[in-house]
Amino acid sequence: MPKAQIGNEMRKLRFEHDEMTQQELAERVGCTRQTIILLEQGRYVPSLSLAFRISRVFGQTVEDVFRFDEE
Amino acid sequence: MDVLWLVLAGLGFAALVVGLRRFISGFKPASIGERLPATPLQRLGVAGLWVTSLVSLGLVMLLILNGAEGVFDNDVPRYLFWLFLLVGMAAWFTVWRSVSRATGRAVVDERDRDILARSFTVESLIVILSLVAWVIGLTEAYRDQGAVPLDYLQLLFWSTFILGAFGRSLGIVLGYHREPAPDA
């Protein structure tokens, strides 16, 4: 089975939303800032529920925020 | 002679605290580019390591100086034994309160919950190893007498209790130190 990674546009979207801070985003979706940092670095794969909450904060669909990178 | 023992015990205690400090500070979470801020659960894990380690060191020194049975047969060492346990629990509660206050509503997210669940493996491993050591040690030491002194029941229970808390804290700290798997 080929290796795959979940990439995302979170950092870009944060800056497009009045330069939202990582802490602010963390508080709005109910997770820690450490999790947001790891998500932006592509080092943590969120649950479906967290992915939906993040997408809703940015007013986007999950597929607009997260992408499936297959190697 | 007693003074020499106390000085040696004090020096040993100081050396163990320094060693412990180095050991615990080695578990900083790995980060790429930016330093990761500690989560409330992670701070509690580090505090738990400190509290359980210091209480264990205090109790071990008390046992070395008085002997296992001497601790419970004499008033002063026995009160000191209870004092170490109560101070340890009070310290843990104080840290927990201050972490909760410092972070407002303490957030424990899905990643924290995953780490907390995995930390049970470390806790149970340490507790099982401790019980195995106790059973083998007591059986071999008191096989000829056919009975084990009651004081060892106290030591068995409290050591398991403290090691369980230590193991849970270690599991949490190790969980944050481990590189999270980015593969989908």
Image (cartoon, rainbow, N blue to C red):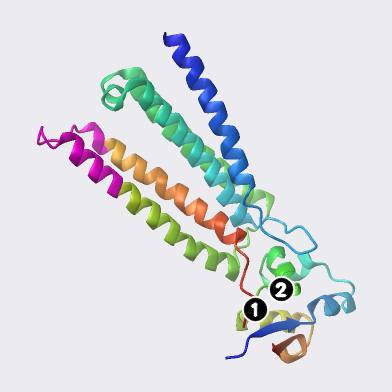
Q: Is residue B79 above or below residue B134?
A: above
Residue at 68%, 49% in the rendered image = B102
Q: Mark 2 lies on which chain?
A: A
**How many C-alpha atoms fall within 10 Å of the one at disc 2: few (<14), some, or many (≥20)?**
many
Specify the label residue A39 is tagged with: 2
Foreground mark, 2 or 1, reads 2
Give the structural element (helix, strand or loop) at label 1.
helix
Instruction: Give the percent coordinates (x, y) of residue A33.
Output: 72, 64
Q: Can residue B159 be seen in this view?
A: yes
Residue at 38%, 30% in the rendered image = B82
Instruction: Give the percent coordinates (x, y) of residue A43.
Output: 69, 72
Q: Does the magenta stretch include residue B26?
A: no
Instruction: Give the percent coordinates (x, y) of residue B88.
Output: 48, 36
Query: Looking at the picture, which amino acid does disc 1 mark?
Result: Leu
Segment tinted magenta in the rendering: B132-153
Please state, as top left, top right, bottom left or bottom right, where the N terminus of chain B lies in the image. top left
Query: Looking at the picture, which amino acid does disc 2 mark?
Result: Leu
> Quick check: marks 2 and 1 in contact, CB under 8 Å?
no
Asked whether, in this view, residue A27 is left or right of residue B72, the answer is right
Count of all numbered marks drawn on residues in the image? 2
Instruction: Give the percent coordinates (x, y) of residue B76.
Output: 36, 18
Choose top left, top right, bottom left or bottom right for residue A45: bottom right
Q: Main secondary structure of the magenta part?
A: helix
Q: Mark 1 points at which residue?
A: A50
